[in-house]
Image (tube, rainbow, N blue to C red):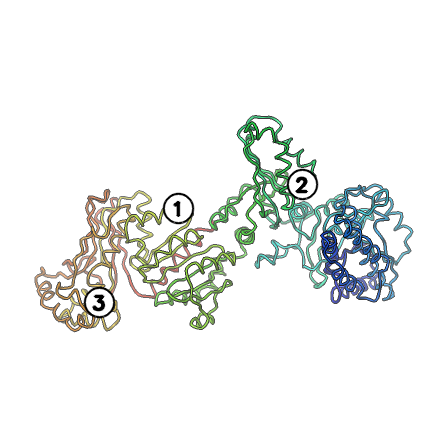
């Protein structure tokens, strides 16, 4: 025989109830022997509790009661007896303004009775022989109203006796959830208790299977309403299911699994509304190992008892739990250090004040002697249980949480099984669940990007990301999503990732914004693994770095400002990064996409003594002097071509003044822990003094005033020499005072490394102790939107890779 249990949503008016009847009819046609266990229909239990609360507080409850009745008798069967009883009970409660747990059980029990009566009636109408069975005649319990304990031996006897006399082919429709004391008083088995009833009947009757028809396909790796990547689990062991049941998987009542284990009865979770799905099978043997699922328990409070005076005292814990037990307060997770000087544990939110009071009473005299300093309550915390987690690999989810700025309030591992529970604030629960889920099941890890700057570099980056997204997901299991793109005035948001289409309609879809809006957006949508990209050329955007870091963003920047303003800020930024365990990558600051900074960082970190860095840092100036040295054209003509080809800034003086090269040199110096400031760089300004001020147009009309000076310099060189504008970091680089930062025009042999550079290439020579006179040379395109964007993209991937470990 099989036991079929149907939940409230499955039995709701309309599609639910009709489908249930069809399912039953099909099984009967196939000749299957079945017994049904039913919950109250729709939201009956909640409705009855609501009416009860209204009646208690003297509010008018009749309208809600009326609509309850209307709903429940929608199938032309009336329930005069149950309705009359409810009416009487509500009236009494409303007169007294109070009720007992016993009355409450009697009230909610009517939901199951009405449900079973109706299902049985409808089966009969379909020509299926059926009886309504009130489980109060079968299940005997203690008188712990609201959460009664079933007395198994006597209940088993009664159940067997009843089913033995039941004619073959008659379908019993049994009420779930309810039982009765030996005196015949109605009790209930706790919320979602019909599952437990069904498991008990399965045990008593040696059922071959228990089928639990719900409104979901089965048990998932996490609640799919919260985690969009959650996947269904096809097989679970009893142990795993039991852990899940204990930690908030509402499909399973905490006690459901136990009666099934001893008789080895499989439990199948099925979806009434998707009956073809195989669902989840819970049984004794599963081959899968490791972490199976994450469950969530909301609505708890953390109680903390503190007191130095308790150190070394014996029996403090016993007093705590006795005090709580006397008031019937259940404790879920406990954490305590090696001494009894403080303890933290969880209770249900609604018990928090009662628990606090209980402890304050118990430890009243200890307060007086100052042995106990405080009982504090942190309300609204939630628990995520990682079922199957062992301690050896717990660092993974833990680190992922910290990276995402979720600091667990308490961590607890089950000594008896592989299960770690993490307590976090309710408002962080969904994000925490997603972070852990992404880390553990690595179905795909989401990385959420916010890109500031829509100029040529930003725009190219967005394009490159769109093009590579699919391949990265496929090869690396990383789902890279651009959740926001902004220019200085407006921002386009989409928490699920901006599509190419939306991006093309930036102007119409974007809205004006402040940085705060971006931060709040990330919070509101619980976005994890956040990276902010600074692809702006803004001098002021750097002000946003610290707030971004403090709000959980890693940073990638093509903007040089943050690294070249005062050394104070440079240090502060790194301090904040460290405090928040965030990263800041800026490979494109020097030499665009060339792997320069990363190389220098690694050399320096590994203890290699870098003695000099010298090179052509500016693509623009590289082009200018390469061309000028090779041709007979006057300097102004070469400069003009560079301007017209877009190789220079709109005001070419920004390139020619040498500050940009100076900044890059400073960035490299600081990588070597030198504490130089910008004004300590000796920069040779290439602009004749009298042209340095004034409007761009005027400057552009006087370019030929460069010519005589530069012609003279060119002709004054030794034979086979060429001009190069270089950055040079040299001197004794072990101390800031002895280091020298120079940016200057030099004449070098044509066949030297610097002399051979062509086009607009950059070149960097890194001299170190081990490499001696043969520097490491890094050369290539050191400017341009495509290579810069590619370099930023590289930094983004570095961050996502780092997070994998
Ligand atoms: N009707 C009860 C409840 O809603 C029992 C159940 O559905 O399992 O908690
Ligand atoms: Mg239910």
Name the quadrant containing residue 724: bottom left
Q: Position of residue 637 (x, y in %)?
A: 16, 72
Task: Kindly tell me whether mark 1's CB lies below 8 Å from ligand 2.
Answer: no
Q: Nearer the viewer, residue 235 or 638?
A: 638
Read off the residue under disc 2.
330
Q: Where is residue 372 in the image (x, y as percent from the top left)?
A: 56, 31
Residue occupying image coordinates x 20% and y 65%: 653
Q: Which of marks 3 and 2 is nearer the N terminus?
A: 2
Tell me: residue 736, above or below residue 72.
Answer: above
Read off the residue under disc 1.
578
Q: Residues within 10 Å of mark 2 (few under 14, many from 20)?
A: some
Q: What element carries label 3?
A: loop
Q: Quadrant of the N terminus?
A: bottom right
Read off the residue under disc 3.
652
Residue occupying image coordinates x 16% and y 57%: 684
Q: What element carries label 1?
A: helix
Q: Position of residue 327 (x, y in %)?
A: 69, 38
Q: Is residue 469 visible?
A: yes
């Amino acid at each position: 025989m099989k036991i079929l249990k149907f939940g409230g949503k499955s039995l709701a008016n309309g599609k639910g109830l009709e489908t249930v009847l069809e399912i039953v009819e099909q099984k009967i046609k196939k000749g299957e022997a079945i017994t049904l266990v039913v919950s109250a229909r729709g939201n009956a239990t909640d409705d009855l509790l609501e009416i009860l609360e209204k009646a208690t507080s003297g509010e008018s409850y009749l309208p809600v009661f009326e609509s309850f009745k209307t709903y429940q008798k929608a199938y032309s069967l009336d329930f005069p007896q149950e309705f009359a009883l409810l009416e009487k009970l509500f009236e009494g409660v409303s007169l007294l303004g109070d009720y007992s747990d016993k009355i409450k059980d009697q009230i909610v029990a009517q939901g199951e009775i009405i449900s079973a009566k109706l299902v049985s009636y409808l089966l009969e109408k379909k020509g299926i022989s059926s009886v309504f069975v009130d489980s109060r005649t079968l299940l005997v319990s203690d008188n712990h109203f609201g959460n009664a304990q079933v007395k198994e031996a006597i209940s088993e006897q009664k159940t067997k006796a009843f089913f033995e006399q039941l004619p073959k082919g008659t379908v019993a429709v049994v009420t779930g959830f309810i039982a009765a004391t030996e005196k015949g008083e109605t009790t209930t088995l706790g919320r979602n208790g019909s599952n437990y009833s069904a498991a008990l009947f399965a045990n008593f009757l040696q059922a071959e299977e228990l089928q639990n028809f719900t409104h979901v396909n089965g048990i998932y790796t996490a609640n799919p309403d919260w985690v969009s990547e959650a996947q269904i689990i096809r097989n679970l062991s009893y142990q795993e299911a039991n852990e899940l049941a204990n930690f908030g998987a509402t499909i399973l009542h905490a006690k459901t699994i136990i009666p099934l284990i001893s008789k080895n009865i499989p439990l199948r979770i099925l979806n009434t509304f998707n009956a073809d799905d195989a669902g989840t099978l819970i049984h004794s043997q599963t081959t899968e190992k490791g972490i199976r699922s994450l469950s969530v328990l909301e609505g708890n409070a953390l109680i903390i008892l503190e007191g130095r005076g308790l150190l070394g005292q014996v029996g403090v814990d016993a007093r705590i739990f006795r005090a709580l037990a006397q008031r019937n307060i259940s404790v879920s997770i406990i954490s305590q250090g090696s001494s009894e000087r403080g303890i933290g544990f969880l209770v249900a939110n609604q018990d928090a004040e009662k628990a606090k009071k209980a402890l304050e009473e118990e430890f009243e005299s200890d307060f007086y002697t100052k042995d106990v300093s405080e009982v504090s309550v942190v309300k609204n915390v939630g628990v995520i249980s990682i079922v199957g987690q062992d301690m050896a690999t717990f660092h993974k989810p833990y680190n992922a949480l910290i990276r995402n700025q979720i600091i667990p309030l308490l961590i607890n591992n089950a000594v008896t099984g592989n299960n770690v529970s993490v307590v976090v604030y309710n408002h962080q629960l969904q994000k925490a669940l997603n972070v852990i889920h992404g880390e553990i099941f690595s179905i795909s890890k989401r990385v959420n990007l916010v890109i500031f700057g829509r100029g040529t570099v930003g725009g190219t980056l967005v394009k490159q990301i769109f093009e590579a997204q699919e391949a990265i997901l496929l090869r690396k299991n990383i789902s890279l999503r651009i959740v926001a793109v902004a220019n200085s005035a407006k921002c386009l948001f989409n928490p699920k990732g901006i599509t190419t289409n939306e991006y093309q309609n930036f102007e119409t879809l974007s809205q004006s914004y402040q940085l705060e809006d971006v931060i709040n957006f990330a919070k509101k949508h619980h976005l994890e693994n956040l990276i902010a990209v600074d692809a702006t050329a803004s001098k002021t955007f750097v002000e946003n770095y610290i707030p971004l870091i403090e709000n959980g963003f890693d940073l990638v920047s093509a903007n040089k400002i943050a690294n070249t303003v005062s050394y104070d800020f440079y240090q502060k930024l790194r301090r904040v990064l460290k405090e928040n365990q965030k990263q800041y990558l800026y490979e494109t600051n020097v030499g665009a996409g060339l792997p320069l900074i990363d190389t220098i960082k690694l050399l320096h970190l590994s203890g290699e003594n870098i003695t000099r860095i010298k090179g052509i840092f500016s693509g623009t100036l590289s082009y200018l002097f390469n061309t000028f040295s090779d041709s007979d054209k006057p300097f102004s003509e070469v400069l003009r071509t560079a301007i017209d080809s877009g190789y220079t800034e709109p005001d070419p003086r920004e390139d020619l003044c040498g500050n940009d090269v100076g900044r890059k040199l400073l960035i490299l110096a600081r990588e070597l822990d030198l504490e130089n400031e910008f004004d300590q760089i000796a920069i040779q300004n290439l602009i004749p003094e009298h042209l340095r001020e004034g409007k761009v147009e005027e400057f552009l009309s006087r370019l030929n005033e460069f010519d005589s000076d530069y012609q003279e310099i060119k002709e004054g060189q030794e034979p086979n020499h060429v001009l190069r504008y270089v950055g040079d970091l040299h001197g004794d680089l072990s101390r800031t005072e002895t280091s020298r930062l120079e940016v200057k025009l030099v004449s070098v042999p044509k066949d030297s490394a610097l002399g051979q550079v062509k086009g607009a290439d950059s070149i960097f020579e890194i001299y170190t102790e081990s490499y001696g006179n043969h520097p490491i040379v890094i050369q290539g395109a050191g400017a341009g939107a495509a290579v810069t964007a590619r370099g930023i993209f590289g930094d983004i991937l570095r961050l996502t890779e780092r997070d994998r470990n």
